[in-house]
Amino acid sequence: MAVVRLSNGAVSDDVLVIGLSYKEDKKSSLVIESGDLTLDTKSLLSTLADIGATGKSDEIIKLPSTSVRLLVFTGLGKTRKKYEHETLRRAAGAATQNLAGNPKVTISLPTPDLDSLNAVAEGAALGAYSFTAFRKTTKSDYKKPVDAITVLSMLASKKDAKSIAFRATVIAKYTDLIRDMVNTPPSHLNPISFVERIKKEAAQAGGVAAGLKVSVLDEKQLIAQGFGGITSVGQGSVNPPRLLHISYTPKKSSLAYAFVGKGITFDSGGLNLKPGPGMEAMKSDMGGAAAVSAAILAIASLKLPIGIETWVPLAENMISDNATRPGDIISIYGGTTVEVLNPDAEGRLVLADALVKAAEVGHNGKALDAIVDVATLTGAQVIALGTRTGAVMTNNEDLAAAFLQAAKSSGELFWPMPLPQELRASLDSPVADLANIGERMGGMLVAGLFLREFIAPELPWIHLDIAGPAFNEAKAFGYTPVGGTGVSMRSLVYLAEAASSRM
């Protein structure tokens, strides 16, 4: 994890990152964007043109320099009077991601306002990541990510800027936690070890003194208390299921949200076995659980004045003589019966248990103001929106609008999707209250409709399907590495910040 600091002084590191853009109205017209740092650009522009630099997004150009050991240009795309925050975030992240092996870097990009400064700091920290936990003989072949980042800006001395560096460091720390957990193989991450990891992280975040409390229900308690979704999904595995509950209670708050995250530590598909090719990526099926766990720890670290209750249903969906069979009927917490037509549609079953429990418990004896669930839920999400954009489904347009604004501010890509009532009838079962699958066309929406059955109409709720963006199987881009991405955590933090500011 990189530590970020702000400075309005001289460059003290031997690696300097600045921006490079291009003007569309002139052929081969490059523009150096060095923010508040003054540079002699004439000779640099000539050299950049000679080597074929374009200034396009994700382009990184490294040149030796007399003033620093290495001068690094990061692409900003088309020249603009003011760059979008996500453009700055990705440019800074692309630079630090490409500068592994350099312990310290200084970044000077355009920061006309504090939001731009925050984006640069955040992106730079997010880009400084690698996952080598399971490398032994080859570990030395991989360069360490950047350890320390200095962001140059004349705004660094402003009172309101002081929290930006700390905030960026916190955001990166907990994004990296999600990435690490998603990248960890199921041989090392199961429901029990997931719980132990989060317990450790909560203690390091301050524990009870920081307003954090952690509790866990084991498999015996889950059975006794009627959590039929979690137990049915996990009963085929030698690694028993768990329900993790993390509560954050600040000293003062008037709002309370619940976060619920799907935690399938490995999804074989159960008796509806998945095809072999690609199954290795199913270690990422706990991406929602990791995201909501990290989000509450980040919110506590930032001391936001909003109560958060995080519920994480954890199970491993495996095959055995005890696995749930197609056609079995289970009882979700609260009593609703579900005919399990497809054991590979398991995420909605564990989420249903947790959603009902979250609403029942509320926060400090009071009803929740909103509930958000996050899940790598359906392959249909990837077909509909691709691998970089998550889906938003809701019963409350105001809450969805607030989340989409938070996502836009964070730079994460989400898109609103409907919950068409005509698809609801496809979830009817001839033998139970509900079936766990329905109409194949519009499968992402049908899954959302299933979850809505476990939400009281008056409780504002949004469902985030992050099946595609949670795990990057293509090449790295911007601040996003290959593997676990950490998606949705930043949006949840931005949502909590926005809600806090309105109190």
Image (cartoon, rainbow, N blue to C red):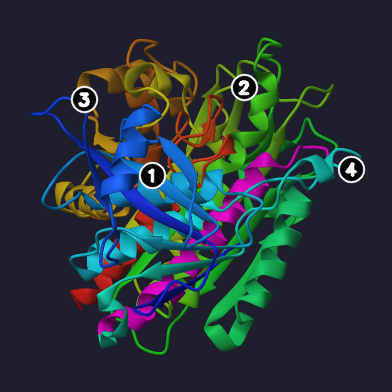
What quarter of the picture does the C terminus occupy? bottom left
Estimate the spatial distance between the alpha carbons at disc 1 and disc 3, rounded to whole Å: 47 Å
- Looking at the image, is mark 1 or mark 3 nearer the viewer? 1
Closest to the observer, 154 or 174: 154
Instruction: Locate residue 306: give its quadrant.
Output: bottom left
**Mark 3, secondary structure of its residue:** helix
Three-letter code for the amino acid on which mark 4 is drawn: Lys
Give the side of residue 111 with respect to residue 347, left or right: left
Q: Which residue is drawn at 60% across and 47% down?
A: 179
> Which tag is nearer the camera, tag 1 or tag 4?
1
Quadrant containing the N terminus in the rendered view: bottom right
Name the element at disc 4. loop
**Range covered by the magenta-colored residues:** 160-187
Residue 73 versus residue 150: which sits nearer the camera? Answer: 73
Q: Determine whether the residue tagged by mark 2 lies in a helix, strand or loop.
A: loop
The amino acid type of the residue labelled 2 equals Pro
**Label drawn at residue 136:** 4
Q: Do the residues labelled 1 and 2 touch (CB within 8 Å)?
A: no
Q: What residue type is labelled 1?
A: Thr
Query: Quadrant of the rendered structure where residue 420 is?
Result: top left
> Mark 2 — residue?
343
According to the image, label 1 marks what residue?
Answer: 74
Q: Is residue 216 left or right of residue 305?
A: right
Residue 421 is marked as 3
Disc 3 residue crowd, few under 14, some 14–19, many 20+, Cα 10 Å: few
Question: Could you tell which of marks 2 and 3 lies nearer the N-terminus?
Answer: 2
Residue 234 percent across, percent down from the top left: 72, 37
Task: Mark 4 or mark 2: name the one nearer the start of the chain.
Answer: 4
Mark 3: amino acid: Gln
